[in-house]
Image: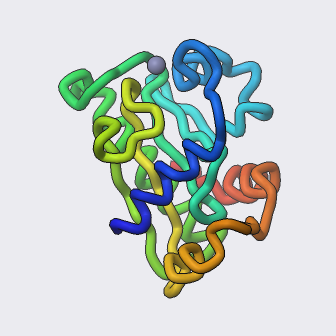
């Protein structure tokens, strides 16, 4: 897990500057741009989006559509919907990628490795035995086995009805 969290931080740093404002709020408000924003699915109050700097193929996030800065801001309805989207994301990842495991987690605060620290989000990262070792060995020349567009199409195709 230490490798994993460090990896997320490194990838956000490597990704360069983020746009002004809150990117999650922008994506949350722009449902007409779901294809170009790599949004896999939406609920009433939250959405599921590909991570632009994936740790492994299929790395996605469940995000509130409105700006929620910490766990205290997640009310019961939003919490229930997000956990439901976490479960459906899990099912889609299993069906699309057949991973050996899946990390589900939140980085709360920059010290914990959050790339976007002021808008809470849940990461789901499909894992395979040895991927962390592989990553640390070749981190400088990381090659993703598929494009984000391919991941988006694959996860949408495997998105469960409920
Ligand atoms: Zn926001």
State whether residue 88 appears in this view.
no
Residue 117 is situated, as x and y percent measured from the top left of the image, at: 38, 31
Taking 52 as reference, is 10 left or right? left
Most foreground residue, 91 or 129:
129
Image coordinates of residue 133 in percent, x first then y, are: 51, 82
* Residue at 51 percent of width and 45 percent of height: 61
Tell me how many marks there are. Answer: 0
Q: Residue at x 58, y 74 (%)?
A: 135
Residue 131 percent across, percent down from the top left: 55, 79
Q: Which color scheme is applied?
A: rainbow
Percent x, y of residue 12: 56, 43
**Viewer can see residue 47:** yes
Residue that lies at the very extreme toward the bottom in this rendered image: 129
Q: Please give the name of the residue rendered at 47% of the width and 29% of the height, measured from the top-left corner.
A: 46
Q: Quadrant of the N terminus?
A: bottom left
Position of 102 relative to 87 (above/below): below
Q: Residue furthest front?
A: 140
Q: Which residue is at a point 62% across and 60% down the rendered structure image?
A: 58
Nearer the observer, 54 or 9:
9
Q: Nearer the viewer, residue 122 or 8?
A: 8
In this rendering, the answer to whether 109 lies above or below 90 is: above
From what the image shows, is residue 157 above or below residue 135?
Answer: above
Quadrant for residue 29, please give it: top right
Name of the residue lying farthest toward the left: 72
């Amino acid at each position: 897990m230490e490798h994993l969290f460090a990896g997320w931080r490194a990838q956000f740093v490597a990704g360069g500057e983020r746009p002004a404002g809150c990117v999650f709020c922008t994506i949350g408000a722009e449902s007409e741009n779901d294809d170009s924003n790599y949004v896999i699915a939406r609920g009433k109050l939250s959405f599921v989006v590909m991570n632009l700097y994936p740790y492994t193929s299929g790395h996605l996030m469940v995000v509130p559509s409105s700006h929620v800065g910490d766990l205290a801001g997640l009310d019961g309805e939003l919490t229930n919907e997000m956990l439901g989207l976490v479960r459906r994301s899990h099912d889609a990842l299993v069906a699309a990628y057949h991973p050996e495991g899946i990390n589900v987690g939140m980085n709360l605060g920059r010290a914990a490795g959050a790339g976007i620290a002021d808008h809470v989000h849940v990461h789901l990262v499909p894992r395979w035995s040895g991927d962390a070792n592989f990553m640390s060995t070749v981190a400088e020349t990381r090659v993703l086995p598929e494009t984000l567009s391919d991941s988006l199409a694959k996860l949408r195709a495997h998105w469960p009805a409920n």
